Amino acid sequence: MDTILNTKKEKSKLTPEQLFQIYTECNLPNAPVKQILERYNLKPWDLVIIRKKVQAAALSALAQRGKPGRKQQLVPVEELAKVNQELQNTKDALAAVGHELSLLKKRVD
């Protein structure tokens, strides 16, 4: 009987995509903000919180340095030296193979 008499609507948990959709809809020129908020069963202060979250997320994303999606990581000096040595060995091997190839081509000609 309590569920029938309870006229207060329960707020459902909104996904980040839905929150961003509400944000973009409410920021359109001449947008019916009250109707948009009623559709999602939200109050005006909920929109204020959404706007603050969007602003904080945007500022955080803009403050990151480097290429998008790529995070800088620290590499130990020993590992860097090992990788540089492997690179040098590979370059030397490639140069030796190239030299042998040029000698073989001279013999064929």
Image (cartoon, grey):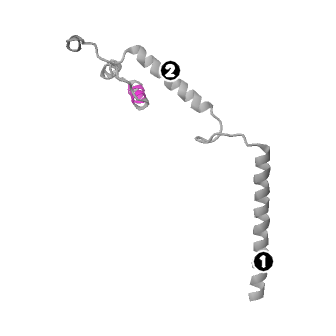
Comparing 25 with 75, the one in front is: 75
Residue 109 visible in the snapshot: no
Total marks in image: 2
Q: Is residue 78 above or below residue 22?
A: below
- The amino acid sitting under disc 1 is Glu
For disc 2, the marked residue is: 52
In this rendering, the answer to whether 78 lies above or below 51 is below
Q: Amino acid at mark 2?
A: Lys
Residue 23: within the magenta? yes
* Percent coordinates x, y for residue 98 in the rendering: 76, 73
Q: Quadrant of the N terminus?
A: top left
| Residue name at image x 78 percent, y 77 percent | 100
Left or right: 58 in relation to 15: right
The question of residue 26 being in magenta is answered with no
Quadrant housing the C terminus: bottom right
Dominant secondary structure (helix, strand or loop) of the stretch shown in magenta: helix
Q: Which residue is mark 1?
A: 100
Relative to 70, 96 lies left or right: right
Q: Position of residue 36 (x, y in %)?
A: 33, 22
Marks 2 and 1 sit apart, C-alpha to C-alpha, by 66 Å
Residue 90 is drawn in which quadrant? Answer: bottom right
Could you tell which of marks 2 and 1 lies nearer the N-terminus? 2
Quadrant assignment, res 68: top right
Dots 2 and 1: beta carbons under 8 Å? no
Residue 103, horizontal then vertical, whole percent: 79, 81
Range drawn in magenta: 18-25
